Every structure is written in structure tokens, then in C-alpha cells.
Amino acid sequence: MDRTDGLISKLLSSLKEYLGLQKEYAMLELTEKLTRLLTALILGAILFVLAIIAVIFLSLTLVAFLSWLTGSAIISYAIVTGLYVLLGVIIYSMRMKWLATPLTNFFINLLLK
């Protein structure tokens, strides 16, 4: 009887230690996945800001070139604005295919890896 009590107490002690280690492992996994996610979001934000700056300078360059061709800055700005409106309509109409689905797949792969 004493031997059985000793084995049960050892088993419970081992089980408690195992559960503690599993909890610690789960926390480490969660920390790693959150770190990957945060890194991807920060990198995306930095690249987005740099892309916006590049687009602004490219737009000004296009306006200067069109103004040289057309002879009017107003017409050049109108053409560039029209191009941005057209681009916005195209992106809005294709948002699920080009943005939502790839981003969802990226985050799923990132978190399930």
C-alpha cells in the first residue's frame, strides 16, 4: 500500500512538472509567433512609408514632364489626378483578389509555421 502511494505521488509530481513545462513551451511559442507578426507589421509599415514617398516624387516628376509636354501645369495635375482615381477604382474592384486573400494567407502561414 505504501509503495502504491509513493508511486501515485511520484506520478502526480511528474504530471505537475510536465504540465508546467507544457505551459512554458506554449508561452514561448506564442512569444515567437507574436514577435514574427510584429516584425512583419513593422517592416510593412516602413516599406509602406517609403513607397508613399517614392510615389509622391514620381508623381511630381510625371507632372513636370506632362507640363513640359502640354505647356500647362493645371492640365498635368489633372491628368495625374485622373490616373490616381483610375488606379484607385481598379484596386478597389480587385481588393479581395489582390489584397485580402494574400494578406490572409500570409498571416495564416506566419502564425501556423
Image (cartoon, rainbow, N blue to C red):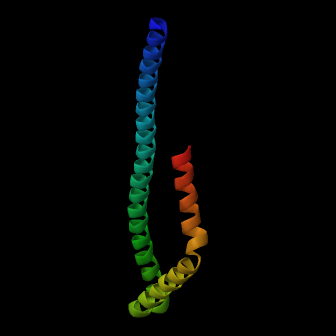
Quadrant for residue 73, please give it.
Answer: bottom left
Left or right: where does residue 101 sit relative to residue 48?
right
Where residue 10 sits: x, y (%)?
A: 44, 14
110 vs 57: above or below: above
Q: Quadrant of the C terminus?
A: top right
Residue at image coords 45%, 86%:
81
Query: In front: 110, or 40?
Result: 110
Left or right: where does residue 49 sit relative to residue 7?
left
As drawn, which residue projects farthest toward the right? 97
Query: In front: 53, or 25?
Result: 25
Query: In front: 51, or 107?
Result: 107
Left or right: where does residue 109 sit relative to residue 15?
right
Residue 66 appears in the figure: no
Quadrant for residue 75, please give it.
Answer: bottom left
Query: In front: 65, or 9?
Result: 9
Q: How many marks?
A: 0
Residue at image coords 53%, 79%:
92
Where residue 30 sits: x, y (%)?
A: 43, 41
44 vs 53: above or below: above
Quadrant for residue 102, please give it.
Answer: bottom right
Residue 76 appears in the figure: yes
Residue at image coords 45%, 51%:
40
Where residue 78 sits: x, y (%)?
A: 44, 91
Residue at image coords 51%, 84%:
83
Where residue 59 sits: x, y (%)?
A: 43, 76
25 vs 10: above or below: below
